[in-house]
Image (spheres, rainbow, N blue to C red):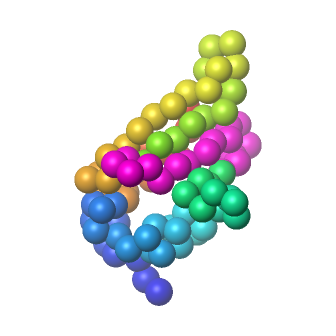
């Protein structure tokens, strides 16, 4: 199954395609909380949540005093834009 064009807003992606996209980026879906995904990179790790109106990203222990950094992205953004912002890290 191919993904929609990367310039397509997230709200025009079927949920299975968004899940495929995150899997291709090395994210792991939480089996108990299906809207929650985790991703680990060498210098950071994060939780990605599919919320009602936006995609939320919580970079774990990445802020001052090891606080979490939270960012939100509207589903009107393109998959390219969200990918660039989220996977650039905290």
- Vertical comparison of 65 with 51: above or below: above
- Vertical comparison of 7 with 86: above or below: below
Q: How many labels does the image show?
A: 0
Query: Where does residue 20 sit, x and y in percent of width and height?
Result: 53, 72
> Seen in the image, is 62 located left or right of residue 85?
right
Asked which quadrant contains residue 5, the reply is bottom left
Query: Where does residue 51 sit, x and y in percent of width and height?
Result: 44, 49
Asked which quadrant contains residue 43, the reply is top right
Query: Where does residue 15 sit, x and y in percent of width and height?
Result: 43, 70
Asked which quadrant contains residue 45, the reply is top right
> Seen in the image, is 85 located left or right of residue 33?
left
- Vertical comparison of 16 with 83: above or below: below
Q: Does the magenta stretch include residue 43?
A: yes
Which sits in the foreground, 87 or 37? 37
Q: What residue is at 55 percent from the left and 48 percent from the top?
A: 48
Q: Is residue 77 magenta?
A: no
Q: Start and end of the magenta stretch? A: 39-54
Q: What residue is at 35 percent from the left and 70 percent from the top?
A: 13
């Amino acid at each position: 199954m191919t993904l929609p064009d990367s310039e397509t807003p997230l709200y025009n992606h079927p949920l299975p395609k968004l899940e495929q996209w995150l899997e291709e980026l090395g994210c792991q879906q939480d089996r108990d909380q299906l809207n929650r995904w985790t991703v680990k990179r060498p210098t950071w790790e994060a939780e990605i949540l599919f919320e009602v109106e936006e995609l939320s990203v919580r970079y774990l222990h990445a802020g001052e005093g090891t606080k979490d950094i939270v960012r939100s992205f509207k589903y009107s953004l393109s998959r390219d834009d969200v990918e660039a912002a989220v996977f650039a890290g905290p």
